[in-house]
Image (cartoon, grey):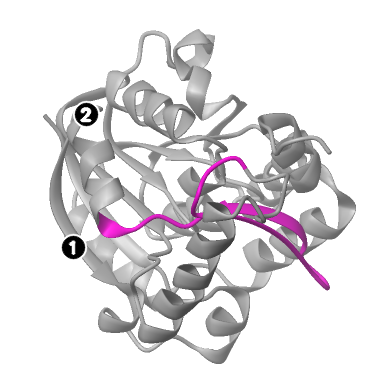
Amino acid sequence: MKKISAQTVRADFNDLTAVVHYTRAAHKLGLWASERILIDRFFPDKDARLLEAGCGAGRVCTALWGLGYRRLHAFDFAEELLAQAQSILLEREAQITLFHADATRLSACHVVKDLRFDGVLFMFNGLMQIPLRRNRRRALRQLAAVCHPGATFLFTTHDRNSSAAEQALWRLEARRWARGKQDPVLREFGDRYFEEEGTGRTFMHLPDRDEILADLRTTGWEHVHDVMRREVAAESRAVRDFSDDCRFWVARKA
């Protein structure tokens, strides 16, 4: 059985079920209340040049345009999602530079070759959908390389220790890994690969807090703030149906 790879993740995001799911969210959901609060707090300058990594069908970048941010670039590595994002940009007359790129190979993209950004967003756990920790660290370094010193970085992850129930589930999973009985397609402890009706197949790495702090330290970012979504805002039923609770992270380029 083949292990999860970047090609697996790309194919899953290009699948029709996933494309419809994320396009619907871009049209109808917009920013979560928690996202809006943290964007207002950490990205107060509407003239800042911002980059959204893993923009998908455009849910966040089009909402940023609607809030008055005008120097926006956004990219994804799933071609079908980008096509939907481009359609939404045209519909809303949003002048956002949209381009195809892989976060782990961003330096190879000509669009950002001569640009430096004041801030980066990587929302809805997009960073955690990159298989293998070394590749997630590579993405963090690549994003830091295209930013000015002091640039702000906002992203989200799950947290294996966020509740007693999660901790109990991961203790059981740790025993499976110790016995070599984990799902054979997974690469690292903390990985999950699952399928949901109406969403499609999803790869996700669920870290603990110490893992992310270490990854930031070694990739050119300084930790500023982290908080669980439930502590930021009470989200609507639509948002809760779309996404489980997650941890927001704020860092700055060293």
The reply to whether dot 2 and dot 1 touch (C-beta < 8 Å) is no
In the picture, the quarter occupied by the N terminus is top right
Q: Give the range drawn in magenta.
A: 187-209
Residue 127 image position (x, y, % from top left)? 47, 44
Q: Residue at x 40, y 75 (%)?
A: 167
Q: Which of marks 2 and 1 is nearer the N terminus?
A: 1
Residue 19 image position (x, y, % from top left)? 79, 53
Corner quadrant of residue 216:
top left
Mark 1: secondary structure: helix
- Residue 48 visible, this angle: no
- Tell whether 36 sits left or right of 182: left
Graded by Cα atoms within 10 Å as few (under 14), some (14 to 19) or many (20 or more), the crowding at tag 1 reads: few
Q: From the image, state whether disc 2 or disc 1 is nearer to you.
A: 2
Disc 1: which residue: 41
Q: Image height check: is 58 above or below 136?
A: below
Q: How many marks?
A: 2
Disc 2: which residue: 218
Residue type at tag 1: Arg
